[in-house]
Amino acid sequence: MVGVVGINFQVFAESEISTETTETVTEESNSKETPEVSPDTLENVLKIKSYNPGYTNEGEFVELLKLSENDISLAGLTVIYITSSGNEYVVYEFPKESEMVGESLLMRLASSDEVQNAENYHDVADVTYTRNMSQSKGKINLVYNDKVVDTLCWGLGGDNCFSAFNSKKPTTLVRDLSAEEYEDLFVHTANYTPNYNPESPGLRITEVPEEKIEPKCRTIEFSEILTYFENSNAEQFIELFNRSDEKVELSKCFLRYKNKNYSLSGEVGANGFKVFYNVSEWGLSLTKNPASSNFLEIVDADGEIIDKLIYYSGQKKGVSFAMIGYKSDGAENWVQTYNVTPGAENSYQQFKTCPVDKVLNLETGNCVNATSLKSTLAACPEGKYRNPLTGRCKSYATTASTELKPCAEGYERNPETGRCRKIVKNDGADYKLEPEVFEEKSDFVAIWAIVAVIGVGLLYILFQYRKEIVGLFTKNNNGKKIDRVLRDKSKTDKQKK
């Protein structure tokens, strides 16, 4: 093995170091500096040494081999697993500040018994990974900056793809370093033990202090957006406002929409606006009229969310959604406005502006023909529209607030009509100047009380004169019997004759 390592180190030294004497090479070798390694060079000095799918007592592992006496940087190196169906999975991506300092680097499956039974995974491996690999078919690629520098294939067939593992005969695929053409030669080896010493690990990761990122965009907020375009999504825009007295640089801040980040650029002047048109060029397509609601966020350079805008279902074509002042509770007042003002102060316009020969239908919000008014009335001044019900010019609403104005001094709000009425003063009376209010329930009880009294009186009369009433009823019945007998007798006499 030593002879092979020496040969490959010579290749590495000749490609990376301009040498004239052997002494120079030795001096560079002893410096232990971490060289910047190109893919071609890494292809010569970094190899897959062995792979075990977990059949043996060692459990699943991947072992790498360094064919250089120098430490090498592993920044940009990724271990990729490819299934028999061609799906690719990242097994491990080496951190930026990682270096391979030993001859071997051992990677173990985190769920294997070897790792689970250890107090610390560093006792049994340099790193661990969570994606287990197939025992029958698969491939491992070492990828450095998008270029494959080494590969190991089993069970897939074809050139340089080795036979599948057999659970009845547990083995490890190990690169044969004694062969002259060892680069593409692996053999199934029984009872193989990977090379790992926890006292001298093969991987070193230099911890770099986190860079403190200062916030930059704390005074930036959403001001206006247009999502429901009329002809093309190029009409969509997002307007930001800077509420501070100093300009703000937007670089390193970004916009977040549907869990994707979009970098911002440029600057916003003091108390000024910044409009981003053609957001589709960013790959950002705002939902024109969401079924429920969508939201956008402004995220500062330090990751802090500094503003959030929610826009709801019911957006209108060619109408922007803008912040118009504040509500009484201090919350921002967002409304749809026909007065679209990107890059300028927002202004509320309740209805669309109609052409000279049309008037606004207040029920539909559409401009309609004004046949009866066209020949007799002039166009309304700017900022006003023709009321189709009265024919008069009326100013557009300038506020989206639906709150009623406070009543003047000496007046109060009538809760029934919503109008202001004059407050009636007491003028010194010792009783309240308020009408008495009787509930309908009282009237209802009074009526039934009268009915009850009448009923009791009738019962009393019936009880007192019960004998006379019964006699009268009996007499009446006897009279009816006598009449019936006389009628029957008369009928019999007529039949005899």
Image: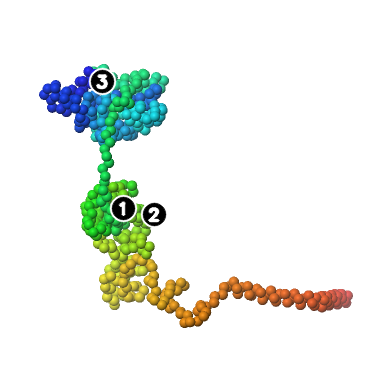
Residue 235 visible in the picture: no
Residue 265 visible in the picture: yes
Mark 2 and mark 1: span between their CA atoms?
A: 23 Å
- Residue 81: mark: none
Q: Which of the 4 image quadrants contains residue 102?
A: top left
Ranked by sequence position, the earlier of labels 3 and 1 is 3
Look at label 3 and name its amino acid.
Tyr
Q: Secondary structure at mark 2?
A: loop
Decide which of 440, 354 is in the foreground and name it.
440
Kindly give the residue lying farthest to the left in the view shown: 20
Task: Residue at 39% x, 76% y: name it.
Answer: 409
Left or right of 445 in this view: 116: left
User: What crowding class fits label 1: few (fewer than 14 Cα within 10 Å), some (14-19), or many (20 or more)?
Assistant: some
State the residue position of label 1: 306
Query: Are dots 3 and 1 in contact, CB under 8 Å?
Result: no
In this rendering, the label closer to the viewer, 3 or 1? 1
- Residue 292: mark: 2
Task: Residue at 32% x, 29% y: name it.
Answer: 126
Task: Residue at 36% x, 69% y: name it.
Answer: 362
- Residue 182: mark: 3
Mark 3 and mark 1: span between their CA atoms?
A: 58 Å
Q: Secondary structure at mark 1?
A: strand
Look at label 2 and name its amino acid.
Ser
Decide which of 182, 403 is in the foreground and name it.
403
